[in-house]
Image (tube, rainbow, N blue to C red):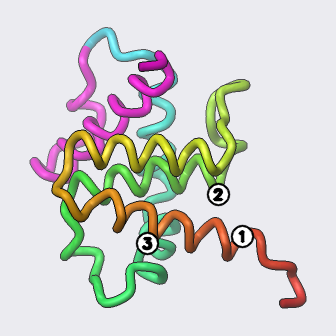
Amino acid sequence: MARRTQQRRAAVWALYQSDLLGRPLETTFERDTHQFTRVLATEVVGHQDELDALISRHASGWTLARIAPLERAILRVALLEMTRPELVPGEHAIPAEGAIDEAVQTAKEFCGTDAPGFVNGILAAVLREQRLPADA
């Protein structure tokens, strides 16, 4: 697994722990957590309302509270990279398709059997929306 993938997953886990345990994000990081992971997770928290609005808009029939905390964290990290690449540290932004692929792979490894399709569906819908011509 690529190093950036591991760092993205570390951001997902920190966000998940913060959400699940109700602890401040900073307390969920290991002492030697890479700066990329810290910035990515912190930017997700800073833009959480915006990211959650996207999730809610595209999660047909699901409320945000009904989505499992780990899946929410996976979606938030991918959506930040897809919609706000300027917030990703340095030259580390990945194409939207790469963010979707990493999110789906993470869901396959750590979530239930329906999660990968659910994550892919929401992220793909956001990507389609982003790519619509302004006059459509």
Q: Amino acid at mark 3?
A: Ile
Q: Amino acid at mark 1?
A: Gln
Residue holding disc 3: 55
Coordinates of residue 55 in the picture (x, y in percent):
43, 72
- Majority secondary structure of the magenta segment? helix
Is 131 one of the magenta-colored residues?
no
Magenta residue span: 1-30
Residue holding disc 2: 83
Coordinates of residue 75 in the picture (x, y in percent):
41, 57
42 relative to 50, above or below? above
**In the image shown, does 75 or 115 lie closer to the viewer?**
115
Is 36 on the left or on the right of 88, as rendered? left
Residue holding disc 1: 130
Is 75 on the left or on the right of 29, as rendered? right
31 relative to 36, above or below? above
Is 18 one of the magenta-colored residues?
yes
Q: Amino acid at mark 2?
A: Thr
Which residue lies at the image location 86% right of the left edge and 82% below the top edge? 134
Is 71 on the left or on the right of 84, as rendered? left
Q: Do residues under tags 1 and 2 come within 8 Å of each other at their CB atoms? A: yes
7 relative to 105, above or below? above
Secondary-structure class at tag 3: helix
**In the image shown, does 114 or 47 lie closer to the viewer?**
114
Secondary-structure class at tag 1: helix
Which residue lies at the image location 50% right of the left edge and 45% below the top edge? 101
| Quarter of the figure that contains the N terminus | top left
Which residue lies at the image location 65% right of the left edge and 27% below the top edge? 92
